[in-house]
Amino acid sequence: MSDARDVLVVDDDVAIAALVADCLSDEGYTVHIAYTGTGALDAIHTHTPDLVLLDIMMPGMTGDVLLGHLRAHGFADLPIIMMSAASHLSRFSLTGATAQLTKPFNIEELIDCVNRHWQRQ
């Protein structure tokens, strides 16, 4: 892990992505945002982050498909925290996810989950 603590937030909801990015930026993380699965792939191949926060329910490539793709194509060790409403979590295979955040989550829960990741490193 680098000292920069780069995080990629992937969520098609612009408001949620901005809120998560603002909160993590305030905590000292360098945050990048992608609004689609393909945008996330491009971002990850351009500059691999230290951690990905990934929404499940997105149009086009869903988060679980992106998770599976990343795990199968050279990003097996990239920490990925999945985010979704509780009703969506049971419909998807999250095999390979580092952790899960159930929406709606509060800001403290988000920050705690991300910070715990770095404390384990």
Image (cartoon, helix red, strand yellow):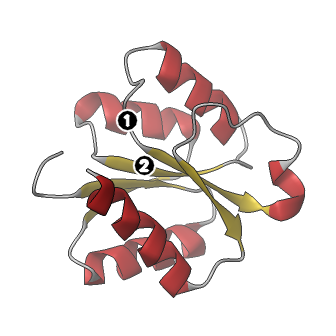
Q: Position of residue 19 (x, y in %)?
A: 49, 79
| Mark 1 nearby-residue class (10 Å; few <14, some 14–19, many ≥20) | some
Dividing the picture into quadrants, the one containing residue 6 is bottom left
Query: In the figure, 26 relative to 41: above or below?
Result: below
Q: What percent of the width, then of the height, locates residue 109? A: 54, 79
Q: Amino acid at mark 1?
A: Leu
Q: Which residue is mark 2?
A: 52
Asked whether residue 61 appears in the rendered view, the answer is no
Q: Which residue is mark 1?
A: 78
**Would you say 28 lies left or right of 119 here?**
left
* Residue 78 visible from this viewpoint: yes
Query: Residue at coordinates 56% horizontally, 44% vertically from top-left?
Result: 36
| Measured Cα–Cα span from mark 2 to mark 1 | 8 Å
Q: Are marks 2 and 1 in contact (CB under 8 Å)?
A: yes
Taking the view exactly as shown, the residue that stands out farthest to the front is 120
14, above or below 93, in the image? below
Label 1's element? loop
Question: Under tag 2, what secondary structure?
Answer: strand
Of tags 2 and 1, which is closer to the observer? 1
Residue 107's label in the rendered image is none
Using residue 85 as the reference point, say whether residue 69 is left or right of it: left
Name the residue located 34 percent from the left edge and 35 percent from the top edge.
Answer: 44
Judge the density around disc 2: few (<14), some (14-19), many (≥20) Cα neighbours within 10 Å: many
**Residue at point 12%, 48% (across, down):** 2
Q: Say which residue appears at 57% left-offset and 75% top-offset.
A: 15
Q: 37 or 119: nearer the eye? A: 119
Which is nearer the N-term, disc 2 or disc 1?
2
Q: Left of 88 or right of it: where is 107?
A: left
Q: Amino acid at mark 2?
A: Val
